[in-house]
Amino acid sequence: MRFSKAFIPTTKEAPSDAVLASHIYLTRAGFVAQVASGLYNYLPLGKRVLKKIEAIINDEMERADAQEVELSFVTPAELWQESGRIEKFGKELLRLRDRKENLFVLGPTHEEMMVNLVRNRVTSYKQLPLNLYQIKTKFRDEARPRFGLMRAREFVMKDGYSFHATAEDLDREFDAMEAAYKRILERLGLDFRIVEADSGAIGGSGSKELMVIADSGEDTIAVCDSCEYGANIEAAHRRVISSAPSEPSLANEKVHTPDVRTINDLADFFKIDPHYTLKAVAKRAIYEESDEIVIFYLRGSDELQEVKAVNAVAALELVDVTEEELEAVGLVPGFIGPFGQNDITSVFDSGLKGATAMITGANERDYHMSGADLSALDGVTFADLYEVKEGDGCPHCDGSLTYTKGIEVGHIFKLGTTYSKALKAEFLNDQGRAEPFEMGTYGMGVSRLVAAVIEQHHDEKGCRWTKATAPYQVNIMVSNIKDEAQLELGETLYSRLKESGVEVIIDDRKERFGFKMKDAELIGLPYTIIIGKELKNGKIQIFDRATLEKSDVQVEEAFETVMGLLK
Ligand code: ATP
Ligand code: MG
């Protein structure tokens, strides 16, 4: 490609709302252009990067025997009613009616569509297993589209779905897909971690996320400092504490505690470790057709993990409540406790099983209970509610957990029979009995990956593409196109590299050297051959974008040197 003919509208202006490097540089360097909130056009350079990533995905899917299909983007609303997700997805679904008033949804993910494709076509265990995928535009009317390609409304996803006769066979395929996803990210040149995750609105188990490590990531992940364990904080566990602070010996009684409301005040007042205080977190749980106030109990030394809490009560979401709302249902804000209080849904963190010597609210203004034994409570619901903290023990080894930030670029999980049951998709097993398919789902954010590469590979000058993702590998910079010798060498190298299959662009624009160099840094191709004044002395320079180093090379060796670098 010739720069003089290319559509690469670089600019000094960053989008006014841009905070992330990828958003700023992909726009400034002319890879993408925003159309409206969360909607982007891909310009030639951006489209090339997308295609590179897609090619690697396709290659690894072929190797894993997954087959590519392409399903309709406009999907019938009836399918979403059959699965019950029309409500669950809520406003994220963009609905539209055709001229006959039929209701449709722009596909935000394609479980229903894929099950619909397979049901009644795959009817026997002999046709299983089957793994179908597509690379396709998705639409989610995100509440807060932001960060450029990272959280768009229209985006490109690789979504794959597998169908099996048995849960064991699903396990096998899940492991194969995890391995394939790992290879894809390795080939893209990314530093990443595969972590345990929550299954989210889609439902299922064995959920894992692929996280590209970056400070700008929206997800917090807890990773072990000595083994492979890593988990999204929404699903992270810790080793059961073996050395709990020593148990205080306080009588089981009601104690007057004026103005003592916070956990710290309480620990100070009783001179105990917060481990022995009972924290009550009240929230309003929103369900499909109702809502209620729920109390989550944890040790005072722990914080509530909201996603775990949502899962514990199977709510759509949890929202904060005011003191007035609590009082309206007979609760005493600051003094809520589990004793003598049965009509409000309560969930206890599983770490509270058998807890003794606890300080709890007494459900009376200015009073707490001391020395409480929680095993005296009847019919208690326990669930995993705590959020792991940095320094907590790893659940698998002697190491400890630290936090890092990650960008979720992929999510794989076992759906089991959730969708096949809901959509009545069955096959005949080897005994001739009808059974629902066991299913797995494997998503990868293709356009989000474009942004993730830049989040991990940029500097203050611009993009620094990895070899596997760069739209072109080599830029040939003819410093002064009026200099015939420079232009001639540029053209010769351009032809030779192209003939050798190298993706190369020649900067043959009538611009100043400094201007072209700024563009080269901003666009961030791995290597730039600089043909300048030193040509008189038989020398050119090779600029390495990753290290910002320029090295002198003899003209005769230019071609071989570049070919060597690209190996
Ligand atoms: P997130 O938690 O970031 O909202 P999700 O859990 O909703 O993502 P999935 O339903 O698992 O996402 O979709 C599979 C993949 O699609 C994600 O791992 C992510 O890489 C990508 N993806 C999801 N939403 C968006 C979006 N709004 N813009 C770009 N990519 C997205
Ligand atoms: Mg996810």
Image (cartoon, rainbow, N blue to C red):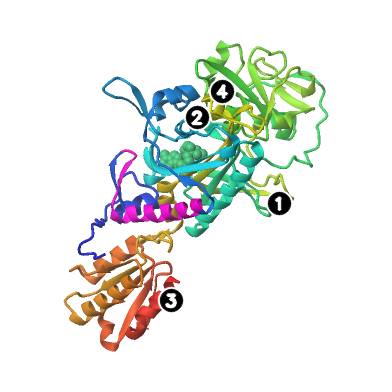
* Residue 312 in view of the camera: yes
Alpha-carbon neighbours of circle 4 within 10 Å: few (<14), some, or many (≥20)? Answer: many
Indicate which label's residue lies in the foreground, 3 or 1. Answer: 3
Determine the residue positioned at 28% across, 83% down.
534
Query: In the rendering, which numbered label is found on residue 120?
Result: 2
Q: Secondary structure at mark 2?
A: loop
**In-front residue for pair 105/25:** 105
**In-front residue for pair 64/484:** 64
Locate residue 441 relative to residue 542 in the image: left or right: right
Instruction: Name the quarter where the C terminus is drawn.
Output: bottom left
Badge 3 is on which residue? Answer: 564
Instruction: Name the quarter where the N terminus is drawn.
Output: bottom left
Overall secondary structure of the magenta section: helix
**In-front residue for pair 327/461:** 461
Decide which of tag 3 and tag 1 comes sooner along the chain: 1
For marks 1 and 2, give the CA distance: 50 Å
Locate residue 397 relative to residue 199 in the image: left or right: right
Q: Residue 150, located in which quarter of the rendered image? A: top left
Residue stretch in magenta: 37-62
Residue 472 x %, y %: 34, 63
Instruction: State whether residue 267 is above or below residue 406.
Output: above
The amino acid type of the residue labelled 1 equals Gly
Query: In the rendering, which numbered label is found on residue 399?
Result: 1
Residue 205 x %, y %: 61, 35
Determine the residue positioned at 35% across, 79% down.
559
